[in-house]
Structure formats: structure tokens, C-alpha cells
Amino acid sequence: MALRAVFTKYNKGAALAAASATTAAFSLVNSQSSAKCEEETLHSPSYPWDHLGLLSSYDCAALRRGFQVYRQVCATCHSVERIHYRELVGVTHTTEELIEMASEVDVLDGPNDEGEMFERPGKLTDPLPSPYQNEEQGRMANGGALPPDLSLMVKARHAGQDYLFSILTGYMDPPAGKEMMPGLYYNPYFPGSAIAMPPPLQDDGVEYEDGTPATISQQARDVVQFLNWCAEPEADGRKKDALTYMVVLGITAVVTGYYKRFRWATLKTRAITYVK
Ligand code: HEC
């Protein structure tokens, strides 16, 4: 992983050097001094995520912190509608904590006996609440750009978690000469470099229960791990099952090999003689 990071860095360095050389040559030929910014989208570096190893699992403390960042920051604009409170039991919180958390939300249910819709406190079986009633309301609140549902976002973008981490930590001032339209923010990792999401994270924007310093990169790391869990909640179980299968298959292969030699022994050791 570290090697890959070095390579990516090296490649990016080489690519940037080549790009600046081309730009320099171009501006010499064209006798122009301005740089072109439109094609400057950066590819995210690859980060060494702890949970990606063959035998490593999610870090539940990080998932708990990430869920907190999601609830306190991202949930104002983004839904995670495929995740239900019950699925978080034993992952980020205990059953009691989640029952209480769910009951703080008013959920529209019904119809009742009289055909009326009614509101009731949320239950463990409810999905996490969405900030907007529908797509149009979401667009209306964000200057026309819809904050997408984040349940499967890690899988929906090339470079998944690395890209999400880069987007969240990659905001910066636009380079000189780059005009930003109102409501758009400069982020070199977003295709086109102009994103409609205002920088969501700030240092100490949340206060972690476990005392972890809430820097921007820490919050980004935690929330991306949480979103990775949302997209792949089965990852830990899958790795555990795979290990069991490999061990069982290994034993079966040895037993089968031995059994085959045993059954074939009579045939393999017989001597065939032909009478002249
Ligand atoms: C103020 C509202 C707001 C908040 C808060 C917010 N976002 Fe967004 N987000 C948006 C909007 C609007 C877009 C669509 C941007 C666009 O299409 O230009 C977006 C897009 C995204 C995208 C998709 C980028 C892509 O490649 O299409 C991701 C991932 C994302 N947000 C993650 C997050 C995370 C994680 C948080 C919490 C830390 C967060 N957002 C907080 C408004 C918000």
C-alpha cells in the first residue's frame, strides 16, 4: 500500500511536471501568460485504509465517530436512506442507544383506521431520516444541485473512499485567474473543479465523545469509513466466512487426496503380465 502511495505520488509529480512543461511551451507559442484551469482535475492519491486488509475488520470506534460526523454535519443535506437503525446495532451503538436515537425522529406512518396519515416516534426498523421530502426540495435548498444519497456513494465513484476523502479535505482557494460562479467552490478533485457543496468540515466542527481531536482530516477519515461500512456492511462477515471456507477446503483437499490414493491403490499397484 505504501509502495502504491509512493508510485501514485511519483506519477502525479511526473504528470504535473509534464503538464506544466506543456503549458509553458503552449504559452510561449501563443505568447499568453494565463494557465488553463478547466482540465486540472486531480486524481485522488491512494490512502492506506486499515480495514482493507484481507484479514482486517472495520474499526468500530471510527465507525461510531463517523456516524456522529454524518448525523451532525452531512445529514443536514444528505440522506443515507438504505441504512436502518437496527443495522447499526453492535456496529456503532448499543440497542438502547439506538432505540432512543430513533425515537427522537418523527416518522410519517399510516394510514390508520380512519384513513389518515399520522406521525409517530421512530423505531429501530425505520431507515435513517432524509433531510428533504423529495428531489425538488433538495435541489431548491442547494442552488439547483442535488446532494446525492450517500448509502452507496463509496461504490458509485471511481477510487471510492480515496476520492471521498480527497473531496472532503481538498477544498482550496481557486488559482489566480479562475473565476468561480456564485454558489460553486473550488475543489481540484471534483470533475470540473467546481463543486456546489460548501466545505462541510471544520476543525472542531464536532466534539467526539472519546476525546479524539476533531481535525478536518480525522473527521473525513471517520465519516468515509462509516460511509464505506454503509456501502459494504457485509465486508467483515464476508472475510470471516472466506477464511472458514479456505480452511475447510484445504482440509477437504488433503482428505480427498489421501482417499483417492487409498481407493486407487489396488489398481495402481497391480502388475499386469501377458502370457506368451
Ligand atoms: C450544505 C449542504 C451539504 C452538506 C452539509 C454536505 N454536503 Fe455533500 N453535497 C452537497 C451538494 C449540494 C452536493 C452536489 C455537488 C455538485 O453536484 O456539485 C454534494 C455532493 C457530495 C458528494 C458527491 C460528489 C460527487 O462526486 O458527485 C459527496 C461524496 C458528498 N457530498 C459527501 C458529503 C459528506 C461526507 C458530508 C459530511 C461531512 C457532506 N457531503 C455534507 C451538499 C452538502
Image (cartoon, rainbow, N blue to C red):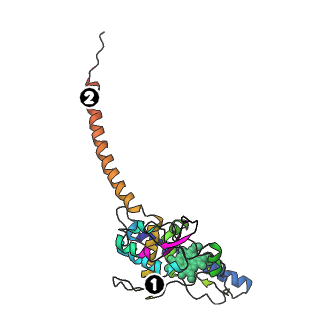
Q: Which residues are magenta?
A: 101-121
Q: Nearer the viewer, residue 11 or 127?
A: 127
Is residue 257 depicted above or below 225 in this figure? above
Image-quadrant location for residue 265: top left
Mark 2 or mark 1, earlier in chain: 1
Q: Quadrant of the image for the C terminus?
A: top left
The image position of residue 264, as x and y in percent, is 29, 29
Badge 2 vs badge 1, beta-carbon distance below 8 Å: no
The image position of residue 206, as x and y in percent, is 43, 85
The image position of residue 75, as x and y in percent, is 51, 78
Is residue 42 depicted above or below 211 in this figure? above
Q: Quadrant of ligand 1?
A: bottom right
Q: Residue furthest right?
A: 30
Residue identifier under label 2: 265
Give the amino acid at mark 2: Ala
Q: Is ligand 1 less than 8 Å from the beta carbon at label 1?
A: no
User: Is residue 189 at least partly visible in the picture?
Assistant: no
The image position of residue 165, as x and y in percent, is 49, 76
Disc assigned to residue 216 = 1
Q: Is ligand 1 less than 8 Å from the beta carbon at label 2?
A: no
Q: Nearer the viewer, residue 166 or 2?
A: 166
User: Is residue 239 at least partly visible in the picture?
Assistant: yes
Q: Residue furthest bottom?
A: 176
Q: CA distance from mark 2 to mark 1?
A: 68 Å
